Image: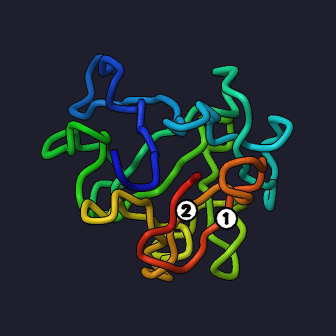
């Protein structure tokens, strides 16, 4: 299989519907298919500017995320998914932490990723799945794709330029 190797397990899970609401909320992890590391908020700290990295999969809340598409920030929509990767193609989304403050991942300076308070329409906090290259890209820096430094051997998550940016 080609591409960045992101596997979105958010949509592998059964939806939980809250009584009296009209939307479905789904949570899960982002797992690298090559090394099985998960998207992780460093130390489980729900703090502004906290680093978002990759770490061994332990399934705790600091590795739980929800994909919230920009046009449906109030309710997660679950139709039109890419069944191989669990994303809708080219549709902007936020990576929202499941920690108590529900902060979002932000691409900082077209490189590092950290946890920040959600700001409406901030494209540095928005991402999309490129179905052609099979990569997660920054909405602000569209030619930058998510990768793990050192060909997947590092804990550092970053965005880098190049159409064929890979995790390994």
Q: Earlier in the sequence, mark 1 or mark 2?
A: 2
Tag 2 secondary structure: strand
Which mark identifies residue 168?
Answer: none
- Whole-percent x and y of residue 116? 69, 61
**Who's the residue at 70% across and 33% down the image?**
62
Q: Nearer the viewer, residue 32 or 168?
A: 168
Q: Is residue 53 above or below residue 86?
A: below
The residue pinned by badge 2 equals 146
Q: Are marks 1 and 2 in contact (CB under 8 Å)?
A: yes
Q: Residue at x 21, y 37 (%)?
A: 83
User: Residue 95: x and y, percent?
Assistant: 51, 51
Q: Quadrant of the N terminus?
A: top left
* Mark-to-mark CA distance, 1 and 2: 6 Å
Relative image position of residue 21 (x, y in whole percent)? 26, 28
The answer to which quarter of the image holds residue 59 is: top right
Q: Which one is nearer the viewer's eye here, 72 or 131?
A: 131
Question: Residue 158 got which mark?
Answer: 1
Looking at the rendering, which quadrant does residue 129 occupy?
A: bottom left
- Secondary element at image label 1: strand
Q: In the picture shown, does residue 92 fall above or below 58?
A: below
Residue occupying the point 61% across, 35% down: 35
Instruction: Locate residue 12 relative to residue 61 in the image: left or right.
Output: left
């Amino acid at each position: 299989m080609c591409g960045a190797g992101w596997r979105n397990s958010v949509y592998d899970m059964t939806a939980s519907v809250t009584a009296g609401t009209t939307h479905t909320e789904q949570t899960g992890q982002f797992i690298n298919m090559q090394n099985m590391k998960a998207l992780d908020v460093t130390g489980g700290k729900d703090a502004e500017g906290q680093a978002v990295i990759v770490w061994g999969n332990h399934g705790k809340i600091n590795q739980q995320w929800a994909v919230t598409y920009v046009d449906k920030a109030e309710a997660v929509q679950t139709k039109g998914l890419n069944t191989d990767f669990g994303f809708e193609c080219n549709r902007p989304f936020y990576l929202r932490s499941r920690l108590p403050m529900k902060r979002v991942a932000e691409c900082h300076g077209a490189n590092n990723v950290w946890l920040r308070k959600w700001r409406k329409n901030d494209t540095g906090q928005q991402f999309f799945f490129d179905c052609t290259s099979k990569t997660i890209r920054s909405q602000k820096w569209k030619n930058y794709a998510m990768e793990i430094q050192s060909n997947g051997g590092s804990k550092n998550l970053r965005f880098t330029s190049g159409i064929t940016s890979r995790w390994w």
